[in-house]
Image (spheres, rainbow, N blue to C red):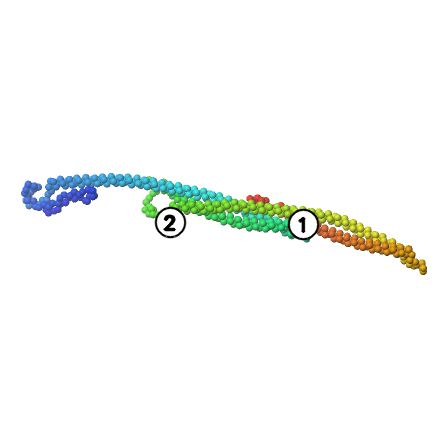
Amino acid sequence: MAHTDVLLTKEPAPQSVQTCELPHKEYDVACNTGAYTSSGLAPTGFSLAKYLVDEWFQNCYAHYYQAFADRDYSQQQRHESQQLAAEMEALAQRTQQDSTRKVGERMEDMHCWKSELQHEIDDLSAETDLLLAQKQRLERALDATSVPFSIAMDNLQCRERRQHPDLVHDYVEVELLKEAELIRNIQELLKRTILQAVGQIRLNREHKETCEMDWSDKVQAYNIDETCARYNNQSTQVQFHPHSSKFEESASTPESWAKFTQDNLLRAQHERLASVNLRKLIHCVLRDTAEDLRLQCDAVNLAFARRCEELDDALHKLKYHLHKILREIMDQEHQVAALKQAIKDKEAPLRVAQTRLYQRSHRPNVELCRDGTQFRLMSEVEELTMSINALKEKLQDAKQALRNLEDTRMSLEKDIAVKTNSLFIDRKNCMTHRSRYPSVLQLAGYW
């Protein structure tokens, strides 16, 4: 081909391989002359463009070199690809193993915190049950105080039925009033303690629920990580999730994650310790209140016993004096009768003496003499009159003494009736009613 540029080239090779090109040559129309023509018999007038033999060998060598270079480059690339694939495979395996190990470590951390949460949940649940039992003791103790309070108020009301002069503000009433006031104060204390226990139970349950939610989240996360730890390259459940490698905005950090659970545990432990202290306080309150009530009950019973002894002693003395009064009344009645008889016995001598004086006053003339007989009769009448007057005066005194004895008898009998009524109220009503006083165990809320 005349005036045609002939260039044997390949596609650009990598920088490491040089491109082999034939020399660019232009050929004129063959003159068919000279020793170096391609054909000495070429027809005249043909324009031929032909390579020389050296150029032909050069072209072949260029193809050989290019083939060698491409083969060498391909082998090098194949070797590098195999090496890179092996390295990437090893890296992928190491990365996957490291990720699996990290998942396992994370599972161990979650298991540790989960165990701590489970332990704290169990402790809180047990503590709440114990506190509930103490609360029930408080409620039973509060119910038990109604009986002592009704007994004390009934005793006070019964003793209001005492009669004068036994209607006194004695030490029994003082102890009863102290007992009623003590029971009211204890009831208020128990009510406040019950409210405190209810509040603490609510806090225990709230923190238990918080720990349970945290535990539930960790169980769910543990199950997810456990599933992830079982995944391998042969798992059929795996698939592509292109956007899963992005962090969630609400995701926590390991520090905040650990601090969240640690704070939950610390708050739960704090409330559990508060619950334990409250239980100890409740036990002390129930023990002290029960002892105080029983001590006051014993003080009231002792006051009743002393008062009943005093009433018995007073009643015995009153009956003794009444017996003496009755005998004295009988003797005094006999004495009154004797005085009356003595006065009556003096009437006959007085009549005799007065009759004698009267008869002698009728003596005639000079016979009406103030002789010794006359003086003696007059002194006899005077003596008899004086004796009668003295006996009448003594009779009046005896009657007054008898009236005084009767009044005293009535007063003693009334006082005996009052003392008997007071003794009946204190011993039969009050002390019998107090026999139903609750025991220390009941007041402590055990049943």
Badge 2 crowding class, 10 Å Cα cut-off, few under 14, some 14 to 19, many 20 or more, is: few
Badge 1 crowding class, 10 Å Cα cut-off, few under 14, some 14 to 19, many 20 or more, is: many
Going by the image, does 37 lie left or right of 319?
left
Distance between the alpha carbons at the discs numbered 2 and 1 = 83 Å
Between 258 and 438, the residue placed more toward the observer is 258
Going by the image, does 426 lie left or right of 442?
right
Classify mark 1: helix, strand or loop. Answer: helix
Q: Residue at x 90, y 56 (%)?
A: 374
Residue 422: numbered disc: 1
Q: Is residue 320 visible?
A: yes
Image quadrant occupied by the C terminus: top right
Between 17 and 366, the residue placed more toward the observer is 366
Going by the image, does 222 lie left or right of 323?
left
Residue 56: numbered disc: none
Q: Can residue 223 be seen in this view?
A: no
Residue 124 percent coordinates (x, y): 47, 44
Instruction: Please name the residue that numbered disc 2 is placed on.
Output: 250
Q: Which residue is drawn at 75% across and 49% down?
A: 325
Classify mark 2: helix, strand or loop. Answer: loop
Q: Which amino acid does label 2 sit on?
A: Ser
Q: Residue at x 68, y 52 (%)?
A: 165
Mark before the other along the chain sequence, 2 or 1: 2
Residue 393 percent coordinates (x, y): 81, 55
Q: Residue at x 27, y 40 (%)?
A: 84
Residue 197 percent coordinates (x, y): 51, 48
Work out which residue is located at the far bottom of the displayed protein and give it: 365
Q: Which amino acid does label 1 sit on?
A: Ser
Q: Are marks 2 and 1 in contact (CB under 8 Å)?
A: no
Going by the image, does 397 lie left or right of 177?
right
Count of numbered labels shown in the rendering: 2
